Structure formats: C-alpha cells, structure tokens
C-alpha cells in the first residue's frame, strides 16, 4: 500500500525547483503537472517511487479550513493553548505538498532522505497516519491528543506572532441571528461557495436593526462630489472640478480631505492616486441609485467609460438630486454582507501571507498573486467603504468610514 504524507510550509509559496532537483541524486527525476494543475516532482528508483504534489494555491484556503476543523474537533471544539498554537500554524500555512510513496519507504533510506530534506528545508509541519509531527518527526498531536513535549509546535510561526496580544473575551450567550439575517447569510454564502472564497467557520452578520440607509438626495449629492474629485484626480483642469461643485451648491457635501484636494495650490500626485480609487465608490453608489441592474463581482476595475457616461448625464440633469431613489434595502444589505466577507478573505490572506486569485475567484483559473499586487483588492476596499457609508456604519462621515471584518 502506498504511504501518504502531507507537508505544510509557512514560509514558502512554492517548492524551490533547484533544491528539489538536487534531491534526485541517482533517481530518475521528472517535473510535471497533476490532474488538478499543481506541479509534481517525481523520483523513481527500480523499487520505489516518490511523487510530491504541490497543491494549487486556489485550493489551499479551503484545505486549511478543513484541516483546522479536524484539529478543533479533536479538542472537542475547545482547544487549549497547545491546540491554539497548532491552529495558528495551520492558518499561517502558505504551501501544501502531498507526498506519495509507492509501494512504501525503502530500507536504504532514500525516501527518508527526501522527506527529511523537505521537512528541514521548509521547516515544515508533517501530517502522517492521522497524526502531526514537527520537522524532526516529533509528535505534535495524535488522535488521542497525546504528544511529545519536546516537539516544536509553532515552528517558524513563533517569529510571525511574537508580541501579538491575546485577549480573552468574556463568555456570553451565543448570538442568535434574526430570520432575515440568517436568510441573507445563506444567500451570500451560496455565492461565496460557488467561487470557493475562504470564509470563517461561523456566520458573520450585519446588524440589520441598526441600519438606516442614507437619504437618496444625500447619496446623489455624494455622487456629484465624487465626480468632481475624480475628475481632478484623473488630470482634468481644477477649474472644471470646482465649477461642478459651485454650480450645484455642493460645498457642504465635500469632506475635509476632498476640500483640501480641490482647493490645493499645487498638484498632489499621491492624493490624486488615492482619490482616483473613488471611481469604485461611485460605481457602488450609482448601482444603489438604480443606474445598473447588477453590481458585478469585484474581480477587476469598474467599467470607467460606462461610469463616465452616466456621470455626464447626471451632471447635466438639474433634477438628478431631487428625483434620486435608492434600490430596495434588502438588495443593498445583501451586497454589503457579501462585500464584507470577501474583504475578510482578502485580509486573512494578507495576515497569513498567502496569495489570492487576481479576480478573487478561487474557483476560476486566474493567476495567483500577492495581495499587495492584486488590483481587485483595492476594488473590494472601496466598495466596502462606500457600502458602509451608505448603511451608516457607526454613522461615520465619509472620510471616517471604517471597514472592519
């Protein structure tokens, strides 16, 4: 029977090809792809074959969630300090490698040499025969919760979380979602599952009872202000932006940050770059006002030509503010919930240094990139900002809106 190991690395995003090649020595060595699209590194001798399957990055988040659930269940859903350390190590994992040995480890120790080199080189957590081991094969956790006290539980994660403050929250009654909240979460979760977006193991709800949407006229005036601000940020003459503000009497709707930018004596490239992202907020607000039937998945930048066309129409319409109307409250709350949970997945990847799909669709075939290099992350951040303003989250003014997850 083949033997199966799983290797979990917290400091590597991919197996280092040159080092994997060096491990071959006298074996026939091959690099290929498995059925899931992940790279394979195969070592063949006449009596034994070792194949290392590198899990595609899109599949890693869900795998880690399932792995963490397995550990949590072993602790009867109440992990102690050691259990929490194990979960930390799992959550910080960036690379998962399945190792298949056929038919089994050899007496000459060639397979052990490969496993040992990978474990030490990656400073890895190892899973074998329903138990967890450190890089030196010391037992971290068995099915009966036994362990070797000398085992290195955290490994490289110890440095990543050093200095982190832990807070024990007071125990209270479990939160009971309202029927509307539960129904909304199920609608949103269906979309997240379809795209295999990583999610929390428990529901994260909006506080529906506290939501009172902005007045339609306030939203329309914010649209016009943002139109002027993004015009200037995109390089249009300052006079053109100021004319829009003054002709429509919008100065009382301009935020302090926006006023400083509009009235500045000199160009500020950094401020312009930041404020140009408000095009994504505009897209959300125009959707909320019914300009578009669908907001669309935040997989990339909004349709700027289409957005500009609608803005020109509204700027030329003297009745735009007076006749503004918002789409149904439930639709806005659904999108706010969805956006919050997508933003959670983005922040989770950033915290644990994992890559994300370029279009934030883990079920698709998009390239995996660092969070800091993914334009769709900026789209989600701006959408979340606009939606939290729209639903009066903490009743904050535009510049002060927070987007916690």
Image (tube, helix red, strand yellow):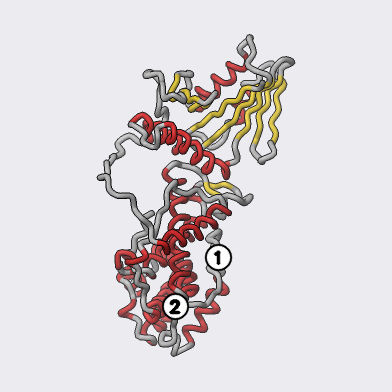
Give the image location of residue 31, x and y in percent: 69, 31
The residue lying at 46 percent from left, 38 percent from top is: 69
Label located before the other in sequence (2 or 1): 1
Could you say which disc has been placed on residue 402 in the image? none
Residue 116 location, x and y as percent?
54, 19
116 or 263, which is in the foreground? 116
Q: Mark 2 against mark 1, which lies toward the viewer?
A: 2
Q: Measuring from the top left, give residue 117's x and y in whole percent.
A: 55, 20
The residue lying toward the viewer, choosing from 250 and 216, is 216
Report the side of 291 relative to 247 (left or right). Answer: right
Tag on residue 296? 1
Q: Quadrant of the C terminus?
A: bottom left
Q: Say which residue appears at 33% left-offset and 68% top-offset.
A: 257
Residue toward you, 185 or 316: 185
Crowd around label 1: few <14 · some 14–19 · many ≥20 (10 Å): few
Rendered location of residue 320, percent (x, y) = 45, 86
Q: Is residue 275 left or right of residue 116?
A: left
Snapshot quadrant of residue 18: top right
How dense is the environment of label 2, judged by Cα within 10 Å: few (below 14), some, or many (20 and up)?
A: many
**Tag shown at residue 326:** 2
Residue at x-position 57% and y-position 49%: 362
- Residue 170 in sight from this viewpoint: yes
The count of marks equals 2
As drawn, 388 above or below 105: below
- Circle 2 SS class: loop
Q: Residue at x 51, y 24 (%)?
A: 121
The answer to whether 264 appears left or right of 324 in the picture is left
SS label for mark 1: loop
The quarter of the picture where the N terminus appears is top right
């Amino acid at each position: 029977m083949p033997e199966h190991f799983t290797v979990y690395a917290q400091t590597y995003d991919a197996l280092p090809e040159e080092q994997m090649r060096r491990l071959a020595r006298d074996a026939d060595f091959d690099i290929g792809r498995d059925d899931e699209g992940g790279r394979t590194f195969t070592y063949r001798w006449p009596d034994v074959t070792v194949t290392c399957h590198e899990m595609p990055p899109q599949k890693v988040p869900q795998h880690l969630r399932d792995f963490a659930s397995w550990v949590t269940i072993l602790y009867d859903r109440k992990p102690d300090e050691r259990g929490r350390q194990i979960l930390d190590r799992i959550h910080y994992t960036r690379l998962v490698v399945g190792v298949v040995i056929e038919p089994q480890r050899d007496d000459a120790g060639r397979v052990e040499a490969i496993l040992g080199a990978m474990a030490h080189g990656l400073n890895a957590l190892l899973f074998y025969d329903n138990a967890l081991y450190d890089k030196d094969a010391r037992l971290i956790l068995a099915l009966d919760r036994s362990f070797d006290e000398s085992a290195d539980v955290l490994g490289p994660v110890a440095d990543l979380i050093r200095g982190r403050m832990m807070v024990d929250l007071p125990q209270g009654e479990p939160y009971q979602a309202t029927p509307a909240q539960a129904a909304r979460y199920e609608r949103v979760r269906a979309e997240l599952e379809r795209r295999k977006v990583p999610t929390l193991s428990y529901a994260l709800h909006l506080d529906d009872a506290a939501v009172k949407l902005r007045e339609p006229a306030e939203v329309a005036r914010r649209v016009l202000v943002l139109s002027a601000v993004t015009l200037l940020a995109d390089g249009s003459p300052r006079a053109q932006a100021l004319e829009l503000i003054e002709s429509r009497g919008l100065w009382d709707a301009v935020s302090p940050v926006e006023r400083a930018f509009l009235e500045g004596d000199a160009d500020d490239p950094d401020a312009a770059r930041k404020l140009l992202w408000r095009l994504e907020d505009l897209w959300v607000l125009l959707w909320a006002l019914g300009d578009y039937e669908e907001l669309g998945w935040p997989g990339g930048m909004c349709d700027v030509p289409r957005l500009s066309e609608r803005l020109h129409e509204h700027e030329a319409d003297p009745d735009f503010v007076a006749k503004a109307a918002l789409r149904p409250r439930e639709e806005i709350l659904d999108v706010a919930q969805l956006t919050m949970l997508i933003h959670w997945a983005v922040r989770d990847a950033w915290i644990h240094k994992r890559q994300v799909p370029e279009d934030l669709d883990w079920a698709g075939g998009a390239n995996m990139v660092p969070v800091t290099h993914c334009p769709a992350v900026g789209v989600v951040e701006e959408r979340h900002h606009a939606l939290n303003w729209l639903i009066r989250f903490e009743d904050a003014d535009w510049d002060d809106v927070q987007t916690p997850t």
